[in-house]
Image (cartoon, helix red, strand yellow):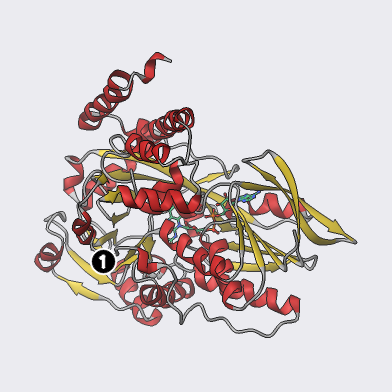
Amino acid sequence: MKTDVIIIGGGSTGCGIARDLALRGIPHCLIEKGDFAAGATGACHGLLHSGARYVVNDPEMAAECMSENMILRKIGVKCVERTGGLFVRLPGDSKKFRDIFLKRCEEAGIATETLSRSRALDLVPNLNPFIEEAIKVPDCSIDPFRLCMLNITSSLKRGGTVLRHSKVVDIMREHGRCVGVKILDESTDEIREIRGRVVINAAGAWGNRIASLAGSGVPMTLSKGSLIVTNHRLTNMVINRLRPTSDGDIIVPNEAVCLAGTTSIPVGDPDEHTVTPVEVDVIATQARLMLPGFERTRLIRTYAGVRPLLQEDARDDRKISRGFRVIDHNNGMVSIMGGKLTTYRLMAEKVSDVVTEILGLKTVCRTAELPLEGQEELSGYPLSKRLKTLENVVCECELVTADDVERVAGKTGAGRIEDIQHRTRLGMGPCQGGFCTYRALGIMQEKGNMTPEESMRLLREFLERRFRGIKPALWGDQLREEQLVESIYLGILGMGRE
Ligand SMILES: Cc1cc2nc3c(=O)[nH]c(=O)nc-3n(C[C@H](O)[C@H](O)[C@H](O)COP(=O)(O)OP(=O)(O)OC[C@H]3O[C@@H](n4cnc5c(N)ncnc54)[C@H](O)[C@@H]3O)c2cc1C
């Protein structure tokens, strides 16, 4: 197979590049070893930053976040929930930091409004009633899975090729230049060659591994961050702690649940995703200080991702810039490193500019003006809009219907339950798929997407994955809920007998 541009990585950056190139009319092929958003993108908070979090340490990056936030809320109405955000100052938190924060926000063009305790409690009744004050900023919540799918829609509509579950295992070079890649197709176990004029390395935390296949390197620092998921939406606004960035100072509402995090731990391996009980404890303790309701809520899951940060000589990886860098290796490979989900569109624009120059083309970027395509299929916000579609509900937590499952299974040819989960949010709510996954697999099997044996294998794999995420937060009511789920699968469905 031949194309002009090969994109390695189907996270927000790679999917954004595919959309950008598609709108410029440049043939391309995106290769992803898992599903879209399999890396840091699918493991993030889903916070569309206003930039306020970074404004004290990295004002330039903060201003970038603000302008991208404004673009994304306009072009991605159905994947961005305009929640707004509060930075809350707790007793003992520095007033001096608050003054610098407000000044820097003004300089970076981030709109702020200082709220008294009672006004903040009117907006978020679950807030700690003893906060000193809160500052309102234009943070939003964003669905990273939907964001990737919508970007890919533009690529597919314009003839782009997208290969999922295909891993780049080698980069082909002739006379020192990259001329293509070798990929291992997971479904056939075959190695295929794809030739291209430029190879883009958008492999996030795996970027250095990819660059080394082409005899290059990219300077990166890897930082693991862990998150916890609650069984309730405890707040309708993003809540941040007004202090220098630290562990456990962000809570983001995400449809029916809340995501709280995060930690920042240097790691050497991009596949290091272990969440330790200590991390869970730290995040939950910090979150409770902002939203005391955390004390009584069930933690239904934990997960972790690895940030691909620019390498800098900083002892504390929180001090490393969240900015990005485009590296032209001058051998037919261009790498894009660092950045945030929030700035993915800008990152894609900058890397596509470099690529068009290498190809000797004159094109302009249109991604900031045109709405993301494919949004008509989504119900949008608030979640309650979906109550209208109460027929044949398969997943009660996220209101996913049998029709949704059939539509996605038909489109993806799904032999994987994650395809359905990422595209519909099935199983992402309070029961974490405990009550709906077997129903969805039943539908897929009835519709001929898989055999009964395959559906049982997928169910088993799903349960193992699910348990890995749930295990670090198993106590109290969640432990009881888990016993109920266990009795459904091992008892009623008899899965323990094999
Ligand atoms: C815990 C955490 C919380 C975060 N929260 C936020 C937030 O709230 N807001 C925000 O703006 N940013 C956040 N970030 C940062 C943000 O998630 C990342 O900067 C962004 O998602 C990176 O996207 P990416 O596409 O560059 O990398 P990734 O999403 O990691 O994508 C790289 C892709 O490359 C694929 N790949 C790797 N090797 C190969 C190969 N050999 N062949 C084929 N494919 C390959 C991987 O499977 C992966 O899907 C967070 C990050 C973490 C870790």
Count of marks placed on residues: 1
Viewed as shown, does residue 350 lie left or right of 111?
A: right
Identify which residue, 269 or 469, lies in the foreground. Answer: 469
Q: Position of residue 143 (x, y in %)?
A: 38, 59
Residue 41 lies, in percent from the top left, at 48, 55
Taking 423 as reference, is 125 left or right?
Answer: left
Question: In this picture, is 118 found above or below 350?
Answer: above
Residue at 36 percent across and 36 percent down: it is: 442
Give me the residue at 88% from left, 59% from top.
174
Q: Identify the image quadrant of residue 299.
A: top left
Left or right relative to 480: residue 54: right
> In the displayed image of the protein, which residue is found farthest to the right?
175
Q: Residue at x 26, y 66 (%)?
A: 83
Quarter of the image where the N terminus is located = bottom right
The answer as to whether callout 1 falls within 8 Å of ligand 1 is: no
Res. 435 in view: yes
Dot 1 corresponds to which residue?
Answer: 83
Q: Type of residue at label 1?
A: Thr
Task: Please state the horizontal and vertical placement of residue 199, each as a whole percent of the image.
Answer: 72, 63
> How far across and down, in percent of the image, does residue 363 sit?
64, 84
Picture quarter with the C terminus: top left
Which residue, as the protein is rendered here, is positioned at the far top? 497
Q: Quadrant of residue 432?
A: top left
Vertical relation: 249 (above or below) 378: above
Along the line of sight, which residue is nearer the eye, 133 or 291? 291
Is residue 183 depicted above or below 343 in this figure? above
Q: Does dot 1 land on a helix, a strand or a loop?
A: loop
